[in-house]
Amino acid sequence: MAPMPVELAAVKNAPCDEVDAYERLLTDAMRADPMLLAREDAVEASWAVAEHLLGNVTPAHIYEPGS
């Protein structure tokens, strides 16, 4: 196996210049346009509110690797 460059198809425009929402999100994230993405402190503040609203939830069951 040898490394070789490949094109990420998710950022390629569709023939009719229309992209779906997921492609647009990936493209915006790769371009790092601050007007289109939430800042880290805003995301953390949102999670602080969401965690408070969720309350005491049952933790996820941890599975052993390979089980």
Image: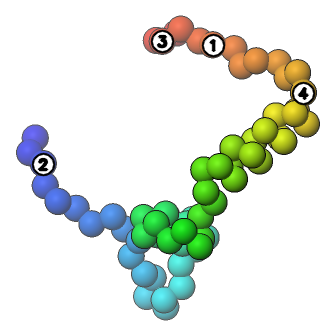
Instruction: Give the residue at mark 4.
Output: 55
Q: CA distance from mark 4 to mark 1?
A: 20 Å
Instruction: Give the residue at mark 1.
Output: 62
Task: State the SS at label 3.
Answer: loop
Amino acid type, mark 4: Gly
Residue located at (87% from left, 33% from top): 52
The answer to the question of whether label 4 and label 2 lie on touching residues, with beta carbons closer than 8 A, is no
Left or right placement of residue 8 versus residue 41 in this view: left
Which of the two labelled residues, at mark 4 and mark 1, occupies the earlier sequence position? Answer: 4
Q: Residues within 10 Å of mark 1 (few under 14, many from 20)?
A: few
Residue 26 in the image, given as x and y percentages of width and height: 49, 64
Residue located at (53% from left, 78% from top): 19
Which of the two labelled residues, at mark 2 and mark 1, occupies the earlier sequence position? Answer: 2
The answer to the question of whether label 1 and label 3 lie on touching residues, with beta carbons closer than 8 A, is no
Task: State the SS at label 4.
Answer: loop
Image mark for residue 3 = 2
Q: Is residue 12 above or below residue 50?
A: below
Amino acid type, mark 1: Ile
- Residue ranking furthest to the left: 2
Residue located at (90% from left, 27% from top): 55
